[in-house]
Amino acid sequence: MVTALSLVGLIGVTAFTIDLGRVFMAKNELQNAADSAALAGARSLGELYKSMSVTNQLSLTLTTTQVEAIRTVSGNAAFANIADMKSLQLAGADIQVGKWSNKTHLFTPTTSVPNAVRVMTRLDNTANGSMSTVFASVLNVDRVGVSAQATAALTGLSTTEPGVLNAPFALSQRWFDSHQCSDPVTFSPTDSCAAWQAFKSPGTSAGDLTNVITILDTGKCPVKNGKPVAGCAESTVITGTIAGQTMFNFNGGAVQSVMPNLELLYNHKKDASGNWMISVPVYQDPAANGCGNPNGFLTILGYAEVAVKSVVAATKTISGVVQCDTKSIGRGGGNDYGLLATIPNLVE
């Protein structure tokens, strides 16, 4: 009797082990499908933002048609995957569009300025059918439900394409320690946590910054006697960058003589509301504590968006408001200073 009971127990354990292995394999397959579907949906969301102005980005509420289009993209990506030898269908409620917070790591379903897509893939009674057991039925376990979940989000911009950074200013990483979205910032008189920057130009003198401003305005170096001025090169300004690697040349002092040129640039670039939307680098502060005086080449840590409200040469003032939830073409996965990438990352 003891031997018979031991044999039954051994068979039960073996049966459970075999079916458990199948469940783990199906779980991995479901996770791959969820990852793929979430990334595809968030990429579709990023493509939507690419075609919009910053103003429209910040006021976006997805229509039913737009939500369904994102769900269709996610569903197609999931269907291209197989779990337990089944092509996967997604239940409508298992594709959610919403907002992911990098600070709290929480996802909130919403169609208002969304930045993320969450997907659940299933083998259960809700979608695709639960898994039938092969051997565990001897323990009265005939079917098993399995699921997986993934969230992909438009995260902090980690790269910029040439021309995305479009102003000779920058913010210190420390500015964000005591400020938040919609806070004002003053670039002149220079805020202690802000600075002038000349991109990759070798110098940051008034002449160098004048060259930079001219390139930002016209796309070309200024011309003297029919030739570009000496030492000026468009490629040092209209350049792509990689956060954590690229270094720009900074000047933490007052360079007031370039203000007329900068006011002209502002007047050329501002919109009907008087806003000049600029993307600026966030630099690694040289000070051990607080905000230091950033002179020379410093590493870019990330990127921010600022709505410049006024540039007045007569009073030598430059003021604006830092924006959040704006999107730019580029890869995500970088530090989040408010400017997000249109190419998503898995966040959970």
Image: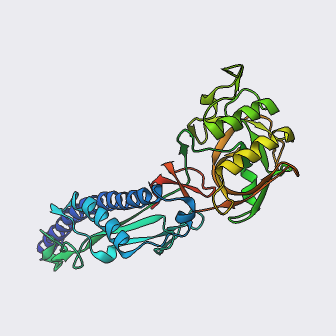
Residue located at (60% from left, 52% from top) = 335
* Percent position of residue 290, x then y: 82, 51
Q: Residue at x 78, y 49 (%)?
A: 194
Residue 294, position as x, y percentages in the image: 80, 40
Does 185 sit above or below residue 296? below
Indicate whether 71 appears above or below 295.
below
Q: Residue at x 53, y 63 (%)?
A: 57
Q: Residue 299, percent across and down?
A: 68, 38
Q: Which image quadrant: the N terminus?
A: bottom left
From this view, report whether residue 255 is shown above or below residue 16: above
Image position of 99 (left or right of 294):
left
Residue at x-position 62% and y-position 31%: 220
- Single out the residue that lies furthest toward the front: 226
The answer to which of 248 and 299 lies nearer the viewer is: 248
- Viewer-side residue, 289 vs 56: 56
Quadrant housing residue 245: top right
Q: Nearer the viewer, residue 236 or 100?
A: 236
Answer whether residue 209 is visible to the viewer in this image. yes
In the displayed structure image, the side of residue 164 where residue 49 appears, left or right = left
Q: Can the viewer see residue 2 in this picture?
A: no
Q: Identify which residue, 294 or 67, lies in the foreground.
A: 67
Q: Is residue 101 above or below residue 319?
A: below
